[in-house]
Amino acid sequence: MSLPGKIARLAQPLVRRFYGGTGCILCLHRIVAEPSRLADNRALELTPDALRAALAWLRGRGLEPIALDEIPARLSRPSGRKFFAVTLDDGYRDNLTHALPIFREFAVPFTVSLTTGYLHRTAWPWWYALEEILHQRESLSFSWDGTRHDLPLRTDAQRESAFAEVARLIRAQDNPSRDALLALLHCDTAGQAPLLTWEEARELAADPLVTIGCHTLTHPVLCRLDDVAAREELAASRAELGSFFSRPVRHLAFPFGGASAVGPREFALAAACGFTTAMTTRNANLFPAHAHHLTALPRLSLSGNYPVIPRLAALESGIVTAREYRGRRVIVA
């Protein structure tokens, strides 16, 4: 082992002690047998074996699995072992078919945050539709906002590059412009197969391990919306889910929850719309101070692009947070 490697290994207990926190929330999306061909989409996926390995590792380290409903109390009155909670965003069918049996196997509760437009089939996870299109063609050409885009698609590297360019363009739009661009690209109806139906969501919600959370109406980049539209995304989806499942929906997972997509305005809107907690995609552990920032909670994002245990170990230790946020522990901005 090199000298820097030895130093890093010796420093791990100190890093964990300072950055390990009192708990963590895992951010997952899909559990799939066959991972996606594009790295951006593969980042949303774990295989069933990887999920089993992650849960076994967390259990083996002595972390206590809890439901999201318990987090406010555990943050305001820290006690006992470090805890972990698990969330799955969007509402994919594999949450029912692949994930649920594994969570039952480990007796671990989890939250599925649903996008109501996906359940209605009035909105779609365009990133999977785009992947399909990029693998069906040798090139993609279109004009948008006065700019011509001519993208070759003959190699994996070209498809990765094209995906990144088009995804940036889509995320830069407000909702009406985004929908028009998706229609232009024919990404507005494809990729329906992976999504839950309303009845499948009801079946999933019937399991005592499952909490239903909210993930907005249409999965927008919230900072691109004005106050009225952003509030509607949160309040209307929460109300519809609460009515359908006949239970209060207390938890929100922000779509595109990085610092460039959500911030203080969105955190305040989540609280005003009645959510007890709201979760970002900032990679960090939870600390007692987060009890004062319950609508800006960080999560630890696992990805099919990395070996699951080394990635999870680095995230849970806090070393990733220490590097990414230059020593800050409580990540709420």
Image (spheres, rainbow, N blue to C red):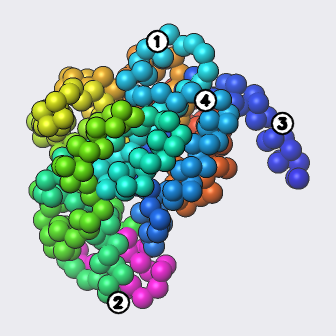
State the separation of the CA atoms marked 1 and 4.
18 Å
Q: Amino acid at mark 4?
A: Leu
Let me know if residue 170 appears in the view.
Answer: no
> On the rendered structure, is 57 left or right of 254?
right
Give the residue displayed 18% in from the left and 49% down from the top.
Answer: 198
Of the two numbered discs 4 and 3 in the rendering, the one whose residue sits closer to the viewer: 4
Q: Any mark on residue 138, and which?
A: 2
Give the residue displayed 63% in from the left and 57% down from the top.
Answer: 307
Q: Earlier in the sequence, mark 4 or mark 3?
A: 3
Q: Residues within 10 Å of mark 4 (few under 14, many from 20)?
A: some
Decide whether residue 205 is among the magenta residues: no
Q: Dots 2 and 1: beta carbons under 8 Å?
A: no
Q: Earlier in the sequence, mark 1 or mark 3?
A: 3
Q: Amino acid at mark 1?
A: Ser
Q: Any mark on residue 76, and which?
A: 1
Decide whether residue 156 is among the magenta residues: yes
Q: Residues within 10 Å of mark 3 (few under 14, many from 20)?
A: few
Q: Which residues are magenta?
A: 144-163
Of the two numbered discs 2 and 4 in the rendering, the one whose residue sits closer to the viewer: 4
Q: Any mark on residue 63, and which?
A: 4
Between 162 and 32, the residue placed more toward the observer is 32
Q: Earlier in the sequence, mark 2 or mark 4?
A: 4
Can you give x and y, in whole percent of width and height, for residue 16 in the image? 69, 30
Q: Any mark on residue 10, and which?
A: 3
State the separation of the CA atoms marked 4 and 3.
22 Å
Q: Earlier in the sequence, mark 1 or mark 4?
A: 4
Q: Earlier in the sequence, mark 3 or mark 2?
A: 3
State the separation of the CA atoms marked 2 and 4.
48 Å
Q: Residues within 10 Å of mark 1 (few under 14, many from 20)?
A: some
